[in-house]
Image (cartoon, coloured by chain):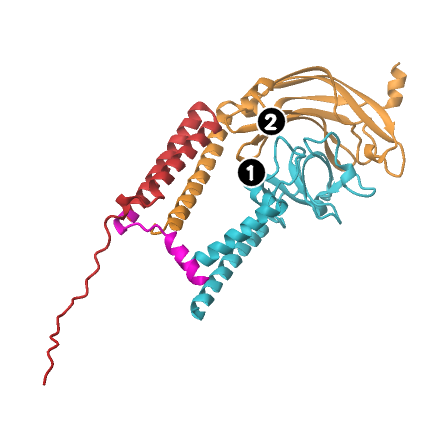
Chain colours: A orange, B cyan, C red
Amino acid sequence: MFSLSQRFQTLGNQAITYGLFISVFIAITSWFQLQSQDADLVPSTIESIKPSLSFRTSRYYGSVNGKPKENAKITFDLETDLTPLFTWNTKQVFAYLTAEYDGKNTHNEVVFWDKIITSKDEAHLKVNGAKSKYNIWDAQDKLSGKELEFKLKWNIQPYVGPLIYGETIGSKDVLVQSAAADDDNK
Amino acid sequence: MNLRLELTRFLKLCFVLSSAFMFWKGLSIATNSHSPIVVVLSGSMEPAFQRGDVLFLWNRNERSKVGDVVIYEVQDKSIPIVHRVLREHHNDKNKQLLLTKGDNNAGDDIPLYGRKKIYLQKERDIVGTVKGYVPQLGYVTIWISENKYAKLALMGFLGISALLSNE
Amino acid sequence: MSELLQDFQKKLIFPLDFPSQRYTERLQQITLLVGAIVASIVGLSTQSLKNLIIVYGISIAITALVVLPAYPAYTRRKLQWVQPKVVNISTESIE
């Protein structure tokens, strides 16, 4: 503390050290806040999922060597209230609608729809007949004939600290019917 | 000019540099990732990550999950990319295919993967999964590497402090 | 050139006397700690990181104002060095 530069240095070091402690404090308190708000028990309802199939020949739709690839889109209804995920350390919540299914010796999970939520006011999601954001294809062969399990999952992006993942309670199983079967029904 | 003093000073500098290097490499071994701490360079994950945010990576997970934010490096492009996993397909033999997308981008990353590739492979391409986050701390590095006046100012500051310090 | 630098260097030191060095270090530790705690409480109770950063920033600024400059009160108690005794030696020449 003899010279000005020494004083400046010790002040800077100490301010940064306490700043780190404050960051840890923020991360811990926000975690407890999430627990007390039952963030892991948020219910969601996913209803009336209607898949529709098409064939694409572009590489950007999963086609290899120009062979037609079966692509799936869906429409769906969704309702959930993600307000419990917001604490004083929540910068954004990334909510995503995934489908899990098993293939030949494989397990797969794909995202059909997602949404970035940056404030509590937007946290109540209610969509009817929404279209999926992405065209989904299977890495091996095709989606038709497979049983998809839909779930809404979330990821909390904090201002400082660890990223937190979880899923809402509630799922929906849907069998994707092949295009041929679809035609038979008509 | 005291030779002994100068040599001690030099030794101290070596000590600082080598301990920083050891810390980096130790962290690299612990996380199994060749760059365990990265600075975000693009805005493609906004508003989750802005340019200059510091990310802490972990690469000891066997598989990536959908929703994970991963850093990947495409072969023959040296720029690491921070994006979110949108799809994963894995089999029993621990081979995993991933498709990623930036939150702020309209489409997925297939155009970035290079010729004929439509998936990333977990083992080969992924540098790490983002676990922790500190905002804006890395902006200094972007600032220094992209602004020549900042670079000069840093050089000047280092030079002057080296000249003026007598410890 | 190097003399000029050294001159400059001496002017930049702004030394404190010894008791004040100890005092400012203690003071800095306490004010920063109190600032950090108050900032955390204010931030948590108002649920706002912005308030936390503002309060902590103010506490750092206050600490800097109190600790950094060499106020006259910090430089008064100079060390008393032992004075060399001046002995009068008679210069009468011996003849």
Question: What residue is rendered at 51% in x and 61% in y?
Answer: B14
Q: Position of residue C63 (x, y in %)?
A: 36, 38
- State the CA–CA distance, disc 1 to disc 2: 19 Å
Q: Position of residue B60 (x, y in %)?
A: 61, 45
Q: Nearer the viewer, residue B123 or B145?
A: B145
Q: Residues within 10 Å of mark 1 (few under 14, many from 20)?
A: some
Q: Disc number at residue A1?
A: none
Tag 2: residue type?
Val
Judge whether residue C18 is colored magenta. Answer: yes
Q: Residues within 10 Å of mark 2 (few under 14, many from 20)?
A: many
Tag 1 secondary structure: loop
Asked if the residues shown at circle 1 and circle 2 are in contact, with their CB atoms under 8 angstroms apart, the answer is: no
Q: Nearer the viewer, mark 1 or mark 2?
A: 1
Where is A54 relative to C5, above or below? Answer: above
Q: Chain of mark 2?
A: A
Stretch of the chain drawn in magenta = C1-21
Q: Position of residue A50 (x, y in %)?
A: 77, 18
Q: Nearer the viewer, residue B123 or B44?
A: B44
Q: Is residue B167 in view from this perspective?
A: no
Seen in the image, is C79 located left or right of residue B77? left
Q: Nearer the viewer, residue B98 or C38?
A: C38
Judge whether residue B97 is colored magenta. Answer: no
Q: Position of residue A16 (x, y in %)?
A: 45, 42
Q: Chain of mark 1?
A: B
Tag 2 secondary structure: strand
Seen in the image, is A58 located left or right of residue C26? right
Q: Do discs 1 and 2 share a chain?
A: no
User: Image quarter for residue B141?
Assistant: top right
Q: Disc number at residue B136?
A: 1
What residue is disc 2 on?
A93
Question: What residue is rendered at 69% in x and 34% in y?
Answer: B102
Tag 1: residue type?
Gln
